[in-house]
Amino acid sequence: MWLEMKVKGLALDPLSNMPIIILRDEEEKRSLPIWVGLFEANAIALELEKIPTPRPMTHDLIKNILESHRRPRGQGRGQ
């Protein structure tokens, strides 16, 4: 069974002092904490706050590649 979850926010683990991404389901019944590195947490925080970066980050490039391959035929590249 697949369960769609979205980023609810970022937190800091008081014991390890490492960032945690908090995922929540749409009904807000379930949570999934994921411990990440400082660089990953920073990139996620920039996206959540809609802060532009001077150049695309690696995950932006991968997202653009994946989205370009999801387009129906006749719309954009990969026709």
Image: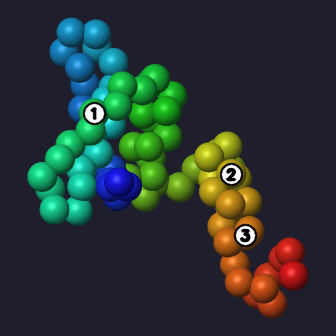
Q: Give x and y (percent) for residue 27.
A: 16, 62
Task: Report whether 73 appears left or right of 64.
Answer: right
> Residue 53, relative to residue 32: is it above or below?
below
User: Which mark lies nearer to you, 1 or 2?
Assistant: 1
Amino acid type, residue under disc 2 in the picture: Ile
Task: Report whether 35 appears left or right of 71.
Answer: left
Q: Which residue is painted at 25% across and 25% down in the image?
A: 12
Q: Which residue is painted at 43% across and 58% down in the image?
A: 50
Residue at which label 1 appears? 33
Q: Give x and y (percent) for residue 23.
A: 29, 45
* Element type where label 3 sits in the image: helix
Mark toward the start of the polypeptide (3 vs 1): 1
How far separated are the C-alphas under marks 1 and 2? 23 Å
How far separated are the C-alphas under marks 3 and 1? 30 Å
Amino acid type, residue under disc 3 in the picture: Ser
Q: Which residue is painted at 28% across and 14% down in the image?
A: 17
How far separated are the C-alphas under marks 2 and 3? 10 Å
Q: Residues within 10 Å of mark 3 (few under 14, many from 20)?
A: some
Q: Which residue is painted at 53% across and 55% down in the image?
A: 52
Quadrant in which the C terminus is drawn: bottom right
Q: Nearer the viewer, residue 13 or 43?
A: 13
Amino acid type, residue under disc 1 in the picture: Pro
Residue at which label 2 appears? 62
Mark toward the start of the polypeptide (1 vs 2): 1
Q: Residue furthest left?
A: 29
